[in-house]
Amino acid sequence: MAPMTTAGEEMHALVERLYPLCRSITGDGVRATLDIVGEYVPLQVHEVPTGTQVLDWTVPQEWNIRDAYIADSAGKRVVDFAASSLHVLGYSVPVSATMPLAELRAHLHTLPDHPNWVPYRTSYYKPQWGFCLAQETLDAMPDGEYEVRIDSTLTDGHLTYAEHVIPGQVPDEVIVSCHVCHPSLANDNLAGIAVATFLARALAEQTPYYTYRFIYAPGTIGAITWLARNAGRIDRVKHGLVLACAGDPGRLTYKQSRRGDAEIDRVLRHVLTASERPHHVTEFTPYGYDERQYCSPGFDLGVGSLSRTPYAGYPEYHTSADNPDFVSPEAMADTLAVCREAFAVLDRNRRYVNLSPYGEPQLGRRGLYDALGGRSDTQQAQMAMLWVLSLADGEHSLLDVAERSGLPFDTVASAADALGAAELIKA
Amino acid sequence: MAPMTTAGEEMHALVERLYPLCRSITGDGVRATLDIVGEYVPLQVHEVPTGTQVLDWTVPQEWNIRDAYIADSAGKRVVDFAASSLHVLGYSVPVSATMPLAELRAHLHTLPDHPNWVPYRTSYYKPQWGFCLAQETLDAMPDGEYEVRIDSTLTDGHLTYAEHVIPGQVPDEVIVSCHVCHPSLANDNLAGIAVATFLARALAEQTPYYTYRFIYAPGTIGAITWLARNAGRIDRVKHGLVLACAGDPGRLTYKQSRRGDAEIDRVLRHVLTASERPHHVTEFTPYGYDERQYCSPGFDLGVGSLSRTPYAGYPEYHTSADNPDFVSPEAMADTLAVCREAFAVLDRNRRYVNLSPYGEPQLGRRGLYDALGGRSDTQQAQMAMLWVLSLADGEHSLLDVAERSGLPFDTVASAADALGAAELIKA
Amino acid sequence: MAPMTTAGEEMHALVERLYPLCRSITGDGVRATLDIVGEYVPLQVHEVPTGTQVLDWTVPQEWNIRDAYIADSAGKRVVDFAASSLHVLGYSVPVSATMPLAELRAHLHTLPDHPNWVPYRTSYYKPQWGFCLAQETLDAMPDGEYEVRIDSTLTDGHLTYAEHVIPGQVPDEVIVSCHVCHPSLANDNLAGIAVATFLARALAEQTPYYTYRFIYAPGTIGAITWLARNAGRIDRVKHGLVLACAGDPGRLTYKQSRRGDAEIDRVLRHVLTASERPHHVTEFTPYGYDERQYCSPGFDLGVGSLSRTPYAGYPEYHTSADNPDFVSPEAMADTLAVCREAFAVLDRNRRYVNLSPYGEPQLGRRGLYDALGGRSDTQQAQMAMLWVLSLADGEHSLLDVAERSGLPFDTVASAADALGAAELIKA
C-alpha cells in the first residue's frame, strides 16, 4: 500500500475526476462513476429494472439529462447545466418554454444567506422541474422573458449499483457502504467513495478474516434495493460501516448503530479513543445516510457510520461550496487510516477459550517467557498473555481484554496468537 | 375543565371546608369528609366491620368524639376540642375526672420548640387518653385542680373508605390513593384529597385508556383494608400514585416505587424533567404514606408517591401550623397540573410493532410527509415518525422514543397515531 | 481476644521470630515457619512429593541450604548467607569454586539505585546459582580471585503447605490464603502470615456461620497444589481472601476478585467505605499473589486480595529494606481489624424471605416497637425492620439492605434477628 500522503493525493485526484459527473439515484452519471471506480477496484455492476418492487419501495424511472439552461432574451445562458450539474433540480422533468421571470421564480432555488453558492435540490418522487442558482445570479436577472430548457428523460430503465467483494477466511461479511447519487458534491459523497475504494485496496493486500463487501449504491433507494435483493444472505452480515462526508477538515464523527453496543461500535470507539484523535461519538438517529436502512428494526444490523463533520453539520453541505477544495488529501488519508485501524481490530477480535483454565498454565515450560524479545515489550507481552488466559472464557473478546487490561489491542492479539500456537487457547 | 387558577381556588375552598372536621382512622369525621368529596365526584363508600381480618391486621373499634376539654378550677375551658380537632390525642379513650396539674401533665403533649403550635398525636392501638396544646397555654396554667373530660366512644363499628372509578378503554387500572385520616391538617392531607378529586374530574372529561380508581382511605389500616378486600384484582393494577402534602410552597418531590424502574417512575421523572419544574426525585423508602403498603414485597406494585415537600420535611408537619394558610391555590394547581401531564403520558404510552420493519417505509407515497402542517412542526413530526418506526420493535415504548429522540412525548404520540392510521405500526 | 494494640505487638513479635528463616517454595525453611505458626493455631501440615502432577505443573525438587558465602583471597567472607537469607539466589544449585571477580559478576545481583539494599531474587525452574548483595559491597570488592560456595541440595523431596480449619455452622467455606515462600522479607509476607494467624484465633472465639479454612502455602506452586488436591471440594468455597503486604505504613488496598461483584468484593468495599478508613479498591488483574490461581477462569472463585501498599508498589519491595522495621504493630492491627469487620459482615449476610409480605405486618402487636431500647437507636432499629421486611424477597441480602437504607450493617442484621425470632422472615 502506498504511504498515506500518497493515498491522500490519489483519493483527492479520484474526487476531482468524479466531481463533474451528474449523478442521481439512477442514470448514466452513476454508470460513469462506477466505470471510473472500476479502474481502481473490480466492480460487479447491477442493473435493476424500473418498476421492480424493493421492500416497501418501487425502483423509479431512470433519469438522464443532456443539457439544461435558462437563457435571457438575448439568448445568453444565465444558468447553464454545463457549468455545474447542481444547476438542475435532480429528476427534473423535461421542459422547453419561454416565460417571464415572475413565473419562472417558482422554479428557482437559491441560498439567500450564501448569495454566491448554488444549492443542491432534488424531487425524486414528485414530478417537478427547477433550477438551482446563486442568489447573486438571480438578483442580476432583469425582469422579462426567459427561455428555459431542460433536456432530460424520465423513462423506464434501471437503477444501477455496484459491489466489490474481498473474500475472507470465513463467509461472515463486513459491509462498507457509500452513496453514489449526489452530483457535483465533493465531501458528500465523493470523499466517501474515494475512501471506500482505497480501503478496499488496502484490505485486499492480505486475505482478511471476514469477507468484505463494498456497496456503491444510490442513497436510500439503492440501499433498499441491495437489501431487497440480498435478503437471503443478510444473516451473514456481521458488521458494517457507512462512509460519508469523509474529507472535510472537521474532526471525525462516529455514529453508532441502532444497537449502540454492536461490535463495530465498540471497535470504533476503542480505535478513536486509543488513537487520541479528536473525535465525537454520537448515538444512532434514524436520519442521516444508509445506516437508516441497514439499521431499520427488521434488519437491525451492526452498522455504524463514519464521517468527519456529520450530515448537515457544515454550511457547505448540499451546496456548490462542497467542491474539491473543501476536501483535503490529509483529511481523507486520516479517515482512511481510522478505517484501516478499525478493521484491523475487528478482523482479529475473537473470543477464545482457555484450554488449561484451572490455575495458570506454566508458561516458562513452553518457552513463552523468553520467546518474546526486548525488555518492556516482553513485560507487556507477558501481561497480555496472562490477561488473555484470564479472560479466555468464551465470553470476553480480545477487545474486552484490551480494554480491561489497558494494553494495546495489537499486543493482546499477538499474545493470543502465541497462546494459540502453544495450544493453550482456542477460538 | 376550569382554568388552573380557578381549579386552584376551588381546591383551596375544598380544603377549607374539610379542615374543621375531626378525622381519624375510623368514625364520623371520615364519613363527613367523604360526603363532601362526594359532592365533587361520585363515591362508592365502603364500611368494613370492626374485627374484620385484613392481611396481618384487624379492623379496630370505631372511634367517635363529641366534646373534650380541660377546664380550670373556675370552670373555664383552657383547652377545648371545639376550637381544634388537634386538641385531643387521636383515639383517646373517654375520661371524666378532676386531677392536679402535676398528674395531668403525663397526658399533655406540647411542642416546646414551637410554643404557640399545637401538635398532632394519636394512639390507635394502645388505649390512652391525652390532650395536645400549645406550650404557651401550658405555661399559663397555674398549678391546681383541673377538670378533664373526653366524651369519646370506642365501640364496635366500621372502618370507612371510598372509591371513585373512571372506566377506561381497558380494565387495566391506575390507582390514585390519598389518606383521609388526619384531622385539622391542611397539607397532610386535605391538599392531597383536593388534588385527587380535581384530577378525577379532569380525567373523566374523556374516556381514558386505563381505568382509573381513586381510593380515599385512612392511612395504613385503610390501604391494608383495601388491599385485603381487592386481592382478586390486584393484578389489574398496573400503575399507581399516592398523593400527599400536595399544597405546600416547596418544590415537587416524586418518590419512586420500590421497583424504581416502574413505568410510573419513568413517566414522573420524564414529566418533571421535561416541564423544567424545580423538583426532586427520591428513592423508595419503606416509610412515608401508603406506598408502603402498595409496594410491600408481596404486592410490589408500580406505585410512586407525589408530594411537594415530603413527609416530615417541613416544621409545620403534624402541627396546627399545617392549616389552610400553609397551602396555596397555586401550589395545588401546580401539583394537579403535573398529575395531569403525567397521566396524559402514561395513558398514551404504549409499545408498537413496525409492520414494515425492513428498510424505511416510503412515507411520501402515503402522504405522511406533507400532511403535517407548519414548517418546524413538520420537521419534528417527520423525525418523530422515523423515530417511532425505528423503535417500534415491541420493546420500546413511546416514552423510550421520546427520551431517546429528545422530542416531546406529545409529538411522538401524535406520530404514532399517524403511523397507526396508515397501518405502518400496531400496538 | 486481646485488645488490638496487644494483638499488633504479638503479630509483630511473630514477624520477628519468622524473619531470619530461609523460606522458599520447598524445604525446611517452610517447615520451620509452619512449626512456629503452629504454636499459635493448630495446623494440618501436608507434604506433597516431588514429581506430583498438580494441574498444569509438577511439584519440583526440594531445595535446602546450609551455608553459602563469597570469600576474598584472604579467606574473609564478604557476602555471607548467615547474615541474611536474601544473599543467595533462591533455588541456587550448589557451587564450590574459585574465580576472578570478572567471572563472578555474572552471578551477582545488586540494586544500583539503592546501593545499601540487598535484592531478593530466585530461579525456581531454571538451574542457576547466584548471590544477592548490596551495590556498596560489590563496589568495595577489589578485583582478584574469590572463593564462592553454596552448600545447597536440590533433591527429590516434598512441597510443604498447611491448613487450619475453623468448623462453622455450615460446610460452605471461606478460604484465607497467604504465601509462606519468601525468605527474610517482613511485609511480603510475614505480616500476611501474622494477620492470617491472629484472624484465625479471633474467628475461633465463637462458632462462625461459615467454615473458615486458612491456607499457608508457597506462592503459585503451593496454591496450585492446594487447588489440585482439593478439586472435589472447590464447590464448597464460597468466598476467600488472599492476605499479603499486610503491615506496611500505607493505606489499605482491596483488589477485587476476577468477578468484580462477588460477595467478598461487596463486603470489603462496604466495610472499607463504612469505616471511613483511607483505602483504595482496584480491579482484578491476573498478576499479583495467589488470587491469580483461585480466580483462574476454570475456578473463578470469589476470592479477593487485601494488602496495604500492594504488590511491587513500594521501593522496599523484594529487598532487604522490607525488614521488621518496615512493618508496624499498628498497621497489622488495622489490617486485622478490617478482616474481622469484613468477616463479621460476610458471616451474617444472608437473604431472607418475608413470611408476611402482603402489606406491612403489625409490628406493634408483636412488641417489636417497644422492645428495642434507647430513643435514636430505637428509631434506627424500627427503620431497619421496615427495610428488612421490604427487601426480604429472597433476592436482596442484608448487605443490600444496609447499602440501600444507609443504615449500619449491624443494625440491619440485628433487625433481621428480631424479625426472624418473631417468625416474620426466614433465611
Image (cartoon, coloured by chain):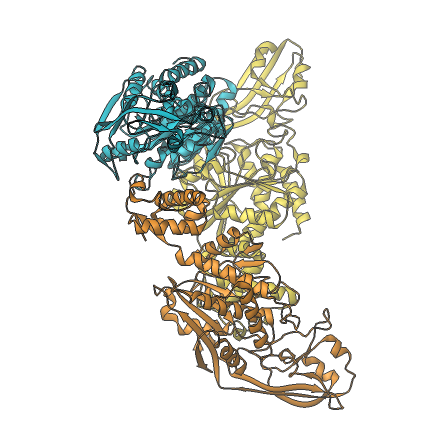
Chain colours: A cyan, B orange, C yellow
Q: Residue at x 68, y 35 (%)?
A: C325
Q: What is the count of numbered marks?
A: 0
Q: Is residue B208 visible?
A: yes
Q: Is residue C50 visible?
A: no
Name the spot of residue C94 as percent of width and height, x first. 52, 20
Q: Is residue A130 left or right of residue B70?
A: left
Name the spot of residue B330 as percent of width and height, x first. 59, 63
Of A79 and C336, the residue lying toward us: A79
Of A364 and B97, the residue lying toward us: B97
Q: Is residue C397 left or right of residue B210?
A: right
Name the spot of residue B33 as percent of width and height, x first. 52, 78
Q: In this rendering, is residue C185 above or below C151?
A: below
Name the spot of residue A60 as percent of width and height, x first. 25, 32
Q: In this rendering, is residue C286 above or below B426?
A: above
- The image quarter containing residue C385 is bottom right
Of C376 and B287, the residue lying toward us: B287
Q: In this rendering, is residue C384 above or below A368?
A: below
Q: Is residue C308 left or right of residue B47?
A: right
